Structures are given as C-alpha cells and as structure tokens.
Amino acid sequence: MALPPRPVNPPCPFRATPPQRSGSAGWRTALALSAALAAAPLAGCGVFSAPEQLRGNRADAELLQQLTPGVSSKADVTAVLGSPSATSTFDDREWYYISAMSHTRPARVPAIENQRVVVVRFNDQGIVEGIVQKGEDQMRNVSVVERTTPVPGNDRSLLQALFGNIGRFGPTTTQETVPGANAGSGAPPR
C-alpha cells in the first residue's frame, strides 16, 4: 500500500490559511502598498526635526511684571532678567534683551521664529523709565550684501600657486647645512 505524498513544508497548525485573493484584490493591495511607500518620507518629517532652541535672553511677561517703572533700578533688572544681550551704543541708558526660537530642519537653513526684543530704558539715576516690547512685525529686514572685500596681495596663477614654494624653505635645524658630510661613514654625528 502506497503512502500519500507528504508536502515539503507542512502548514503550521497555529496559523490560519490566508484567503484566496481575486484579481481586483491584488490591485488594491498594490495600490495600498504604493500609497504607504509614497507617504513614508512625509511621515518622518516630525520625527527627524530638531527640537526648538531658545536663542538669546528671553524676557517673559511674568518676569517683566516684577519690574516697576520709576522704582526698579539697574540692579533689580539684572537680578530679574539677567545681563542684557546688548546696550545702547553711546550711553548705558537702554538695555536690549533679544531672543528668538530656532529649530534646525534636516538639510535646510535653521528656521528662526518668534523673535522678540525687550527694551528697558533708564533715567540718569539708573531707575527704570519704561519697558517696550517689540515683535517681528516692528523689526526691519536688513539685507546682506553678497560682495566680497578685495584683499591686498599677489594674484597668483595656477602654476605659481603649485610651484611657488619650491626653494623657499631652508634645511631644518636637525639637518646639517653641508650635504653629504656623514653620507658614507655610517657613524652617528658627533
């Protein structure tokens, strides 16, 4: 009596057999797979972005409420807000607290958001005269000039740059100035 043929890989008794697919189900599977592959690069955008970083010295509203114009001094302002980011150019009557939130995006220039400048003005006695907050809408956009400043010096050609240092340097301090003085003796120099 002949035994029935055994399959090479018998089905696993713990796993249900997959249902048979018709022709249209294959297209739906392929369409769902291609949609998932197309959305995969966009799904990682939030994962790979850097966290926001505070740049500068942020003077929050809660801290500014602790300062009273006409009463608070420079020492009080330093104790509450810290040292200023900048002071006025010609006198020490205005202190600037400059801050911004930035985050670096992959393969891009860092993005700057939520820029703020808090100006604290003092009178001649060093007492706070006023506090002014300036946002992004009150700032001026300064364009950067793309020119380069010429540097005085020699304009060298390619051959001058390649061969320009030949013969410029003398022997080092460990070498003797007379070539071949100890060439054949094999003895160390005295």
Image (cartoon, helix red, strand yellow):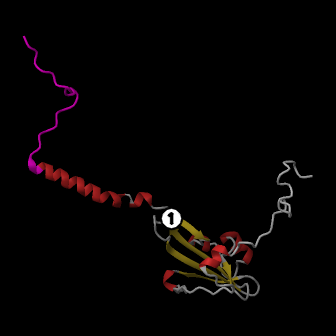
| Quadrant of the snapshot with the N terminus | top left
Q: Which residue is mark 1?
A: 52
Main SS type for the magenta part? loop
Is residue 179 found left or right of 134 in the rendered image? right
- Of 7 and 139, nearer the camera is 7
- 138 within the magenta span: no
Outermost residue, right side = 190
The image shows residue 26 at horizontal and vertical percentages of 14, 49
- Of 148 and 10, nearer the camera is 148
The image shows residue 46 at horizontal and vertical percentages of 40, 60
102, above or below 34, in the image? below
175, above or below 26, in the image? below
| Residue at 66% over, 74% down | 163
Give residue 151's quadrant in the image. Answer: bottom right
| Residue at 50% over, 81% down | 136
- Of 117 and 166, nearer the camera is 166
Q: Which residues are magenta?
A: 1-24
The image shows residue 17 at horizontal and vertical percentages of 16, 33
93, above or below 108, in the image? below
